[in-house]
Each structure stands twice: as structure tokens, then as C-alpha cells.
Image (tube, grey):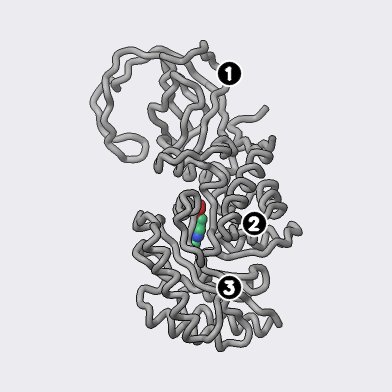
């Protein structure tokens, strides 16, 4: 056994994918399964490829190229607006991309022409989250008409992204605004768009509550499938049938001692130049686990799976735990397990110092 270790439960993953794709299908919505949150670990991507997801989506071309080289032939959606410098790879390896710049769409058209391919384009509208997308409806319309008239790209539809930068909560109003934009475009180009993509995990609650406007027929879902943490914990939704233990983290205890809880001496700065505040709780039983910020980056985004254990802090390679109230007698050489949320899965799945175990 080697630690630290990231455990991935593939059957639980498949069950979560199926639960989401079934609920969405019942509402006439196709799901792009988003795999960037776990850095596209291949056995997990294979589960998405074998599911009812209509595409596999990620923000990085490097991952899409890996998937293709690995023989995954699912439709691939590039989520981040393509760099002009990667246009050749985009049309060669991805089938579809999200876009918001006419110059990029033109570069894709040119590259697709050279490669003898047709690349599908979804144009993004910014409805207030202030990350990617057209802010100005006229500019969106102009780009739609331009895209429609290019030979080597197919204008597949429009989409939006919410709840990423601006923390904006998708609601029926925002979705109706997107449908309105789609219908304006349809009037201009004289045909129906195939895809109206209503967002990410944060739009999924509208499906569950039956409030998603009928014409929204596509969502791009990552976190809600791979962690199922945000909706039950932050939104307070009942996510019956969804596992929140697809990715777990396990590492070994290297020290157990009774220690003061308040540092002793003149307090200055910690290993990362911060000035934390320390609460004096007297002498308590502490353990050090072999893992650190280099692995999970944020020690408040990993959650001890056992009652009575809490995370006190960490430096790059040491994780300090309070085990005073632990239900078992934790000893050096024992292991502890953590549940994870999206940021910790993202960092840990990209960690070359840990083993990944598929169960
Ligand atoms: C990451 C991403 C998603 C998926 O987001 P989740 O919150 O993980 O569901 C969807 N769309 C775009 C454009 C993204 O970048």
C-alpha cells in the first residue's frame, strides 16, 4: 500500500452519471459529461464514454488529445473558448467547442477547411456571470449570422455559463432570456438551432424542480456528477440516489502526540506568509498525516470521513489533525480517509505524488 492515495469508485460514478442523464432525459435534456474536475483520469472518462452522455466535455485540449489517443470515440466538446493558436488541434480532436469571439470562429473555420472537417460551434451568451460569452445581443446576432455563413463550421446552437465567476444562480428568468436570444437568432437565420445549452451543475436544480423552460435541451454537468457536494450541502437539495463518495482521499499518520493548541513563542507568519489566528483549546491529541497543500491545496476542502477528527491546518507536506474526540485510538501507521469537494478532487487528481486506486 502506498500513501497518499486517491480512491475512485467507478461503479458509483456510473450510477451518478445514469441518475443525472435519466432525470435530464425525462425533461428532454441531453447531458455533456464534464471531466475536467478530475483531470480526465482515463478509467473514469471511459465510464462517461460508455454512458448516455451526449458528449464528453473538458476545458483543456491536452486532455481531449489524450482521450482520442486512448481510443475514446465519444463526441468531444471543448469548454474553454479555443485559443487561436490551438485551432488546428481543436478541429482535429474535438467535435464541438464553445465560442464567443468571431476571430476564433473564423480561425476554426479555416483550420477545419484545411483538415477537410466540419466543426460544430456553440456561441455563448453572458447573462450576468461575467465570465465568457457575448454581453451585447447585437454582437451575438452578428456572430451567429457570420457563423451560419461559414462553410467549415456548423452553427449548432447557443449556450450560457452561470455560477462560475459571478456566483450568479441560474433561474427560470435567466433560462428564458437564453431561449429568447436563441429565438431571435433563429428568426434571423431562418432555422431552428439544435442546441440551447443552459449551463452547468448549477442549472440542474431547475430540472429537478421541473422549472426548466422547455426549449433548454442541453446541460454541461461535472461537479453534480463527480462530487454531488454543492447541491446537497450548499444548496440544501435532497440528492436522493446520488453518491458523494466517488473520489476519496486516504493517507497515513506519521505522528501522534498531545500538544498545546496555541503556538508557543512570538507569532509571526506561517509557511505561506499568512498570519493565521490560533484558538487556545488547551492540550489536545494531535496527529500529523502525510499529505499537504502540495496535494490538496486547500485544507478546508477536505473532510475527515470519521466523526471526532478535524483538520487543524497544513503546510506543503504535513496535515495536522485534531484527534482528541476520535472514536478509535488512532496510532502512527494508521490511515485516515477524507471526503472531497470539487477543488480538492481537481488538485488531487493532478497530483503526481499520489497513487490512484480504482475500486
Ligand atoms: C467547467 C464547466 C462546466 C461544468 O461545470 P460544473 O459546475 O462542474 O458542472 C460547464 N460549462 C463550462 C463552460 C465549464 O467551463
x, y percentage for residue 252?
56, 24
**Is there a contact, CB below 8 Å, between mark 2 and mark 1?**
no
Q: Residue at x 66, y 44 (%)?
A: 14
Q: Few, some or many C-alpha atoms within 10 Å of disc 1 (few <14, some 14-19, many ≥20)?
A: few
**Which of the pair 227/338 is nearer the observer?**
227
Residue 99 versus residue 107 in the image, above or below: above
Which element is circle 3 on?
loop
Q: Mark 3 = which residue? A: 194
Q: Few, some or many C-alpha atoms within 10 Å of disc 3 (few <14, some 14-19, many ≥20)?
A: some
Q: Residue at x 39, y 69 (%)?
A: 177
x, y percentage for residue 188?
47, 86
Front label number (1 vs 3): 3
Front label number (3 vs 2): 3
Query: Left or right: 179 with respect to 167?
Result: right
The quarter holding residue 152 reads: bottom right
Quarter placement of the N terminus: top right
**Which of the pair 46/107 is nearer the observer?**
46
Cα distance in 3D space between marks 3 and 2: 16 Å
Q: Mark 2 = which residue? A: 53
x, y percentage for residue 95?
64, 70
Query: Left or right: 213 with respect to 60?
Result: left
Q: Few, some or many C-alpha atoms within 10 Å of disc 2 (few <14, some 14-19, many ≥20)?
A: many
> Could you say which disc has been placed on residue 333 in the image?
1
Amino acid at each position: 500500500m502506498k500513501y497518499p492515495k486517491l480512491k475512485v469508485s467507478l461503479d458509483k460514478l456510473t450510477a451518478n452519471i445514469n441518475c443525472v442523464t435519466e432525470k435530464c432525459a425525462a425533461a428532454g435534456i441531453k447531458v455533456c459529461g464534464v471531466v475536467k474536475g478530475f483531470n480526465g483520469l482515463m478509467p473514469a472518462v471511459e465510464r462517461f464514454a460508455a454512458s448516455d452522455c451526449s458528449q464528453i466535455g473538458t476545458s483543456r485540449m491536452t486532455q481531449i488529445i489524450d482521450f482520442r489517443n486512448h481510443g475514446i470515440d465519444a463526441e468531444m466538446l471543448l469548454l474553454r473558448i479555443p485559443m487561436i493558436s490551438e485551432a488546428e488541434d481543436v478541429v482535429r480532436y474535438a467535435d464541438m467547442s464553445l465560442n464567443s469571439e468571431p476571430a476564433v470562429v473564423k480561425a476554426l473555420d479555416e483550420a477545419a477547411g484545411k483538415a477537410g472537417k466540419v466543426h460544430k460551434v456553440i456561441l455563448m451568451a453572458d447573462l450576468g456571470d461575467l465570465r465568457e460569452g457575448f454581453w451585447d445581443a447585437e454582437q451575438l446576432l452578428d456572430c451567429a449570422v457570420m457563423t451560419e455563413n461559414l462553410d467549415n463550421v456548423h452553427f449548432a446552437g447557443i449556450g450560457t455559463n452561470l455560477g462560475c465567476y459571478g456566483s450568479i444562480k441560474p433561474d427560470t428568468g435567466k433560462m428564458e432570456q437564453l431561449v429568447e436570444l436563441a429565438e431571435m437568432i433563429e428568426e434571423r437565420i431562418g432555422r431552428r438551432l439544435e442546441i440551447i445549452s443552459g449551463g452547468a451543475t448549477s442549472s440542474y436544480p431547475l430540472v429537478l424542480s421541473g422549472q426548466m423552460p422547455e426549449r433548454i435541451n442541453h446541460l454541461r454537468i461535472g461537479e453534480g456528477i463527480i462530487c454531488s457536494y454543492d447541491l446537497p450541502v450548499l444548496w440544501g437539495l435532497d440528492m436522493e440516489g446520488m453518491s458523494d463518495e466517488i473520489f476519496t482521499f486516504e493517507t497515513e499518520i506519521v505522528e501522534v502526540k498531545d500538544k498545546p493548541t496555541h503556538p508557543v513563542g512570538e507569532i509571526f507568519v506561517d509557511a505561506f506568509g499568512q498570519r493565521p489566528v490560533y484558538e487556545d483549546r488547551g492540550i489536545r491529541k494531535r496527529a500529523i498525516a502525510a499529505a499537504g497543500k502540495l496535494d490538496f491545496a486547500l485544507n478546508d476542502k477536505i473532510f475527515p470521513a470519521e466523526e471526532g477528527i478535524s483538520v487543524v491546518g497544513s503546510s506543503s507536506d504535513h496535515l495536522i489533525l485534531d484527534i482528541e474526540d476520535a472514536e478509535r485510538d488512532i496510532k502512527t501507521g494508521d490511515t485516515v480517509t477524507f471526503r472531497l469537494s470539487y477543488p480538492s478532487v481537481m488538485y488531487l487528481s493532478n497530483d503526481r505524488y499520489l497513487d490512484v486506486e480504482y475500486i
